[in-house]
Image: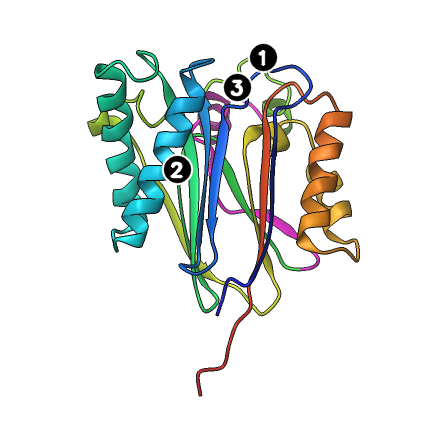
Amino acid sequence: MAFSTCGHVTHVGNVRVHNEDCYEVDADANFCVLADGMGGHEGGEIASRIVVDCVSREIRNGKPMAEALILAHYAVRKAADSGEGKPGMGSTAVALKLDNGDFDVVWVGDSRAYVWDGAQLTQITKDHSLVQHMVDDGRITPEEALVHPQRNYITQAIGMSDLHKMEVGRVQGSLQHSQQLLLCSDGLSGEVSTAEIIEILQMELNESQKVDLMIQKSLDNGGVDNITALLVTAVVTDDD
């Protein structure tokens, strides 16, 4: 078993009326998926639910996660065309699968994944966003990106991007026993600093208590968006 403990929570935030974030954790299949919908009431919340349902189903059926995100893109488009939800609805997504300490993470948009090793918090995903492109091109610094007026403009989204242009990010690696992976929507990463997240992760608390504190910190800092956080601890077994 490599996926025995996970704290997870979602919150509508201080401003929004509807929660367009959605997630699923499947400890038996060692995966979780988080989606942050766009399109407003009866749009974003439907898109994110379609993404989570589709990705979860396809992973359980043995599909590679990147392929599952592409199939979710088709599912959101089909739903919008058939009158379910709203035209133009979409969603970001990040998904994780663990195999005895080896992790596979895929994403579209600016939902993120981090690795916490007990001392350092490392972002392992790379936002599909305008400001990330500007950082990559050297036009702005990472610090400037945090306060840029277009920091919420994403360049990729499931259901909204042209499929031939949609870029599914992927990163693989290995975790040591008890290292953790944090998945979150931008309602957390946009409101809570890396230093604040580290301060919480260092506390002698379980995963559920830590994500609850992260959500509360985001609310205290403004909570202008929906907020979702999943904190997974790797439990690596010795097969010998």
Q: Residue at x 32, y 13 (%)?
A: 88
Residue 136 magenta-highlighted = yes
Tell me which segment is drawn in magenta. Answer: 118-141
Q: Work out whether residue 141 or residue 120 is closer to the camera in this orientation and state it.
A: 120
Q: Residue furthest bottom?
A: 240
Earlier in the chain: of badge 1 and badge 2, it is: 2
Number of residues whose C-alpha sits closer than 10 Å to that of mark 1, classed few (under 14), some (14–19) or many (20 or more):
few
Q: Residues within 10 Å of mark 3 (few under 14, many from 20)?
A: some
Tell me the SS state at disc 1: loop
Give the residue at mark 3: 152
Q: Residue at x 47, y 33 (%)?
A: 127
Label 2 environment density (alpha carbons within 10 Å; few <14, some 14–19, many ≥20):
many
Specify the color scheme. Answer: rainbow
Can you identify the residue that label 1 sits on?
A: 149
Badge number at residue 52: 2
| Dot 2 amino acid type | Val
Residue 143 in the image: x percent, y percent? 64, 28
Residue 89 is drawn in which quadrant?
A: top left
In magenta segment, residue 103: no
Q: Nearer the viewer, residue 105 or 27?
A: 27
Measured as percent of width and height from the top left, residue 2 is found at 49, 66
3D distance between C-alphas at marks 2 and 3? 22 Å
Of badges 1 and 2, the one in the foreground is 2
Q: Is residue 176 left or right of residue 97?
A: right
Determine the CA span between mark 1 and mark 2. Answer: 30 Å
